[in-house]
Image (tube, coloured by chain):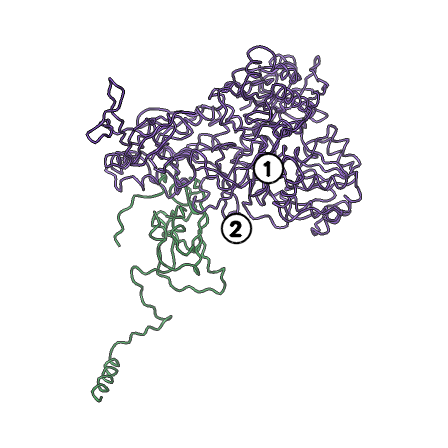
Chain colours: A green, B purple
Amino acid sequence: MLRELTRGLGTTLKSMFERPVTVQYPEEKRPVRPRFRGRHVLKRYDNGLEKCIGCALCAAACPADAIFVEASENTDEKRFSPGERYASTYEINMLRCIYCGYCEDACPTEAIVLGDNYELSFTDRRDAIYDKNMLLEPAPAGMQTTPQKTPSGVFTRSVPDMKDPQD
Amino acid sequence: MTKQVTLTIDGKQVTVPDGMLVVDAAKEVGIDIPVFCYHPKMEPVGMCRQCLVEIGRPMMDRATGKPILDDKGAPKLQFLPKLETACTNPVSDGMVVYTQSEKAKAGQKANLEFLLTSHPLDCPICDKGGECPLQNLTMAHGPGKSRFLYDEKMHLAKNVPLGDLIFLDQERCIQCARCIRFQDEVAGDAVLGFDERGRSTQIVSLSDPGFDSVFSGNTTDICPVGALTTADFRFGARPWELSSSASICSQCPVGCNITFNTRREAMSDGRIVIKRVMPRQNEEVNEIWICDKGRFAYHYAESEKRLSKPLVRKDGKLSRVSWDAAARAAGEAIAKAKKDLVVLASGRLSNEDLFNLKSLADQMEGKAVLYTHMGGGDLVSLVGVGQGTNFGSMGEGSTIVVVASDLYEEAPIWYLRVKQAAQRGATLIVANPRETKLDRFASFVIRYSYGDEVKTVHDLTKKGKIGDAFVKAENAVILFGSDGLGLDGSTALATACARVLSDTEHIGKPNNGLIGVWPRANDQGAWEIGFRPEENLAGALKGKTVYVVGADPAGDNPALAKALNGAEFVVAQDLLETETTKLADIVLPVQAYTEREGTFTSGERRVQRFYPAVPALDGTKPDFAVTSQVAKEAGVILEGTSASVVFDIMAEDVKSFAGLNYARLAEVKPQWPIVGRGDLYYGGTTYENKHGLGAWLSSAAGRSEKFTLPRVQKVEELRPKEKKLLAVPVTKLYDRGVTVESAKLLNQRIGEAFIALHPSAAEQFGVEAGERVKLSLDGVSEDVVVKIDETISTGVVLVPRSMGLPISAPTEASLKVAKKVAVR
C-alpha cells in the first residue's frame, strides 16, 4: 500500500516541475490545427472577385439545412464573380451549423472554407444568421472589392480548372 | 385493333402494338434505354446514338417463311454486326433485345464520353443541373473519366438570346434537335434551325423577332441538357430546392394542367413565391405542353396593386375597416336592394365562387350577370362535346370546324392539338373572316365577310366537298369563337352551330359536339351555374345595387364606368385595385387562385381542381368565403368554410355537375407516354399527374334529355357603310390584360396597339402600313399603328381587345392620321 502511495505522490511531484498545459484564455490563445473547422469564410480570387458562384451545392450538402443561397446574374458592368452567376444572398445559420465541413467538400470553386474562428456567441437568435457581408473575406490589398467593372469576354468561366486537393 | 407483337427485352417478354419502337416497348416494362434525341411525342431521328442496343431477329427460311430452329427447337437469331438504335427500330415478332449486354453497355458508355467531349460541365451554375438528363445518364451509364483533353473543349457563347424568353448556351448544346423538331412537328412554327456543320453546328432562330412562337417555353422542358433556359427562371433556384403544387392554368378556356414550383425567397422579403410554371401531364387536355402565356404570366398576384384590407367609403373616401364591418355594410346594402341586386361576375372566378354568388342572387331574387362579350354557353351546356372527347384521339374520320376564332391567339394549346389531329388525318375546316395560323393545316378554308358567320355555318351542311366532309364525318366538333363578334353575334353563331350539329346528329357522343373558345378560363362554368350575360349591361346597372366580382367594367369601358357611377350602391370584390374598386362603395380583397383551392370548368366542359401553391396574402379571403360572409349579413346562409363542401352542394343543385365531388376530380389513371418520374431523359421535365385528371360535365344531349334548340335570332348586321369603317374586335394572346402586363418578360412581347385594314381601305383613308393614326370608337380615341391585311374584307378595321380601346362588339369607327412611325 505504501508503495502505491509513494508512486502516486511521485507523479504529483513530477508534474509540479513540468510545463503547465493550461492556457490563459482569452488573453492567450492556442493556434488551431491546419484542418480545424471553425466559422466559415467566403474566399476571393487574387483579383478581388468572389469565388462563390451561388450554385447552392453547399446548401444541398448541408445536413443541418443551415445554408440559404439565392443567385443572380453577373454583368460586366457589375461583376461579383467570374461567369454568369453569383450569390446575391448567402446566409448561414450558425446555431444550426454542426461544422461538419460538407459545404467545403461540395463547393466546386473552393469558395467556402471553414476558418479558424471558433469564438461565436450571440445574444439574439437572429444574430446567429451570418449574411454574405459577414462571411466574405476582405478584398486583397490593392484590389477592388465587388461589384467590379470588368472588360467583356474575360471572366466567362464560372468554375476554374482545379487540381486534386492536396491538403 | 392493331396487331400485337411479342418480343423479349432483357429476358422480359413484352407484348405491344405493332409499329411501336423498341425504346417505347422497353419503357412499358420498366426498362430504361437512355436517349437524348428521341422523344415519345416526336418522330424518331436517331441523331444522338445514345440508345445503342443489341437486337436479334429470328432467321426466316426464305422458302417456307417459317423461322429456322436451332438444335433445341428455339428460333435462330440473327444479330447485326453492329449495335442498333432502339429509337428507330420498330418491334417485330420474336425479336430479342439486349440493353445491358457488355457490348451494348460499352456502346452507350463510349457515346456518352463522346457527347461530353465539348460539354462545359458547368453543372453548378446550370439551371438544368439537378433535373438534367445528360447529368443523370452520365451518372448511370457514362465513363468516370474522359480520354479526351480538357483543354480542347470548345469555348462558345454562354448566353445567346434566341428571343426575349429563351436563352441558348451554345457550349451545353448536344445537337439533339429536339427543340427544332418540336417547333416543326408539334408547334407548327418552324422558327429554329441548325446553322453550320460538323462540330460547328449551332441552333439559331430563323424568325424576326427571335423565337417567334407562343410555345417556345416547351423547348426548355424537352431540352436534354441546359442549353435552352427561360429568361424568367434564369438562376432562379436549384430544382431540388423547389416545392411543387398542382394547379390549372387560368389564362384561357383550355384548362391546361400545370405545376407551380415555389420557394421561400429573400428577394421577396422572405415570402414563399412562385418561381416557375411547369406543365403537368394530362393527355386529354394539354398532353405535356403549355403555352408561353401560361408559363410566364403568373406574376400578377405579386403585384403592388394587391388589395389587402376591406375598404368602405366614408365621406367620399375609401377607408380601411375590419372584415366584419365591411361585410355588414355590404350585407345591409344587399338586403335593402332585394330584387335590385345585380351580381356581375366574370369567368375568372372558380365554380365554387360563382355558385355562391348565384345562390345569393337567387335568394334575393336579383340578377346574376356574366361579364363577357361572348354568348352561347347555354347551348354548349345542351350540345357540348360528349364525355371522353379527346383531340388526341381524333384523326381520320373526324371533322373539326373552327369558326370565328383565331385559336393560335385565343387558346394556343387547342391550336396545337387541332393541328396535330389534322396532321393525323382529321378534316379541318377553318372558317374565319381573315387569315389565321391554323389555315395552313386546314383541308378547307372558308373566308367570309364579317357579319356572315351564321350563313357560313348553315352552308356547312350544303352539298359539295365541305358539306360531305362535315355531314358524313364519323365525328364532328365545332369550335366557335368571337372573332369580330359581340354578344348577340356570338350567340347567333353558337345557335347556328348547335343546330347544325344537332341536325347532323353530331351530339351526345365522344368527339362530337360544340366547344366555346371563351375569353376567360371559367366562362363555361359560369354558364353552367346559371350566369347569363346582359345585352345592355350599362342599362342593367343603372340605379341598382351592383356586386361586382372579379371584373373591371369601369376600367374596360368608360360607358360602364358611367353606369356604375349611376348605380345605387357598388360592392367590388377583387384581387387588385382597379378602376371599378376605385369607384366602389365597398371593396372586398380576395385571394388569388394560387393561394386557395377550387375548380375551373374548361371550354371542353371538363372540371379540374387547382390546389393552393403559396400562402395567402394577410387579410384576404377566398371569393366563396367572402360571398358567404356578406350573404350571412343579408340573411342568407351559404357555405363559406370549405370549397369542397360548396362543390358538393353545387353537385346536388346543378344537373351537369351531378355525381361529381373533389375526390372524383382527383382521380388519376396511367397515361402514355410515361413522364415526370425519375426518368427526365424520356419525356422532359413535365410533371407527372398525381393530383387529378378532372371529370367531364354531362351535357343535356349526353344525358339523352329532350330539349329544343332556340331559333337563330336575327342579328342586326352592321355592314361597313360608304366612307365609314366598321371596327370589329379580335383577340390577341399578349394583350394589355393585367396578367400579361405584370409579367415583365411578356410585356415586351405585347408590342404596340395595332389595327388592321384592307389595302383598299387604307388607300381610301390615305394611310400606309406602319403609320400611326388616331382611331375613335364610341367617343374614345387612341393612338394606334396601322397594319395591312389583304385577307380581311374592305371597309372593316380590326381592333384588338384589351389594348386600350373599349371594343366588345362591332361598331362604327373613324380614323385620323396622326404621324408616321416605323413598326417593328
**In the visual, does B582 lie left or right of B295?**
right
Query: Do the residues bearing badges 2 and 1 touch, measured as CB atoms within 8 Å?
Result: no
- Left or right of residue B477: residue B71: left
Residue under mark 2: which chain is it in? B
Q: Does residue B420 lie above or below A66 as drawn?
A: above
Chain ID at mark 1: B
Looking at this view, is A24 or B166 the one in front? Answer: B166
**Between B122 and B692, which is closer to the camera in this rendering?**
B692
Looking at the rendered structure, the secondary structure element under dot 1 is strand
Question: Image height check: is B731 above or below B594?
Answer: above
* Viewer-nearest residue: B571 or B781: B571
Which residue position holds label 2?
Answer: B270
Find disc 1 in the rendering and name its residue: B600
Confirm whether residue B374 shows in the render: no
First in sequence: mark 2 vs mark 1: 2
* Residue type for callout 1: Phe
Q: Is residue B128 left or right of residue B757?
A: left
Q: Position of residue B634 (x, y in %)?
A: 76, 47
Label 1: few (<14), some (14–19) or many (≥20) C-alpha neighbours in 10 Å: many
Q: Do labels 2 and 1 share a chain?
A: yes
Q: Where is residue A34, by image quadrant?
A: bottom left
Can residue B74 be seen by looking at this rendering? yes
Q: Is mark 2 on a helix, strand or loop?
A: loop
Q: Residues within 10 Å of mark 2 (few under 14, many from 20)?
A: few
